[in-house]
Image (spheres, helix red, strand yellow):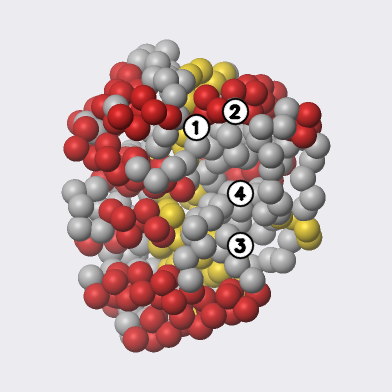
Amino acid sequence: MSPSAQSIRLPFVRPQPLGPGARVAALSLSGGFVTEVPHRYATGVRQAAESLGWEIVAAPNAFRGPDYLYENPQARADDLHWALQNPEIDGMVSVIGGDDSIRLLPLLDADLIRAHPKAFVGYSDSTVTLMQFLKAGVMAYHGPAVLTDLAENGGIHPFTRRGLEQAFGTEPYDLSPAPEWTEAGQDWEDVAAQEIRREFQPGDGWTWLQGDAPGEGHLLGGCVEILDMLSGTPGELPPELWHGAVMALETSEDVPSPAQVGYWLRNWAAKGVLQRLSGLLLARPRDYTPEMTAQLYVWVRRVLKEAGREDLPVVANVDFGHTSPQLTLPLGAQVRLDPVAGRVTVWP
């Protein structure tokens, strides 16, 4: 491990875990698409109750519709603040992603996040909000949204459920590859299709790209496109927060090219971030062909070599982000990557 990347244990506050009986607010922080598929939302609520024991309740503005929420980002920020301050709400989950929750940055109250540390779960555009929790010193959870994995056709996948339970548990655990996965499309407007299980393909395991020694640090990251969108804004994580971190990156359905991902990594190298990392987790890239995946791995190794980090342990094709089923990553928790043993251990 590079001397500049020695692990540092940062004191992130761990929110109260979300377990059976938790009352969880559903937030539309990115947009109001949920009004287009209310039956899909109802399925997510029902399946979360049956599988996780959660009672999901909609935040006051969550169902105001896409036009209203686009025109009123303050209403979206108000919902987060309402959930934080409401003593009857135990945590929060994103309804769905999008592309403009960055507009909430001037409106979010970091003091409220610090004063009322509650679990927030989401991915994709929710990366904006996840980063604000981390900046406030509060752990956050990169995991499923209501309209995606919680409303999965035919029920929440056992792998997704187990990932949530482990992330909110109290014992160390090893991440594991999904036994099966899918990118099969879904017609969310077809009510009858909701109960028809999608076609899955056998799990293809992880790929360890490099590293001969373990790396350990606090887990940070999210959707790479959104992290790039945050670059240079007040919502960006400060470089010092990356010191000793394990970075987790996933790509969205926008399908950025392998070269583009390489350019973003070069940006982090220019900031001195890659040089400070203790490890790197790369998600299964959404809608990539095998050829694109191979090119991605070439780019990752190339940029790490340029940054002098051929020692950095890197594991790819991990099941989080825009893939189903997906793991829940407890951002801010301590993580250890062991390339020799092929293990990724989490201390939640």
N-terminal-most mark, 1 or 4: 1
Give the numbered dot on residue 177: none
Mark 4 vs mark 3: in front:
3
Q: Dot 1: few (<14), some (14–19), or many (≥20) neighbours within 10 Å?
A: many
Residue on which disc 4 sits: 326
Name the residue type under label 4.
Gln
- The answer to whether the residue labelled 2 contacts the one labelled 1, judged by CB atoms less than 8 Å apart, is yes
Closer to the camera: disc 2 or disc 3?
2
For disc 3, the neighbor class at 10 Å (few under 14, some 14 to 19, many from 20) is: some
The residue located at (35%, 69%) in the rendering is 264
Question: Which badge, 4 or 2, comes first in the chain's sequence?
Answer: 2
Looking at the image, the residue that sits furthest to the front is: 67
- SS for tag 2? loop
Q: Nearer the viewer, mark 4 or mark 2?
A: 2
Q: Are marks 2 and 3 in contact (CB under 8 Å)?
A: no
Residue identified by numbered label 3: 287
Distance from the alpha carbon under mark 4 to that under mark 2: 22 Å
Question: Which circle's residue, 2 or 3, is located before the other in the chain?
Answer: 2
**Residue 80 locus on image (x, y percent):** 34, 27
Q: Secondary structure at mark 3?
A: loop
Q: CA distance from mark 2 to mark 3?
A: 24 Å
Tell me the amino acid under the disc marked 3. Asp
Q: Label 1 is placed on what type of residue?
A: Phe
Residue 170, how many percent across, how many down?
A: 52, 39
Residue at label 2? 37
What secondary structure is found at the residue carrying circle 1? helix
Whether residue 36 sits left or right of residue 114 in the image: it is: right
| Residue corresponding to mark 1 | 33
Q: Secondary structure at mark 4?
A: loop
Residue 238 screen position, x and y as percent: 21, 56
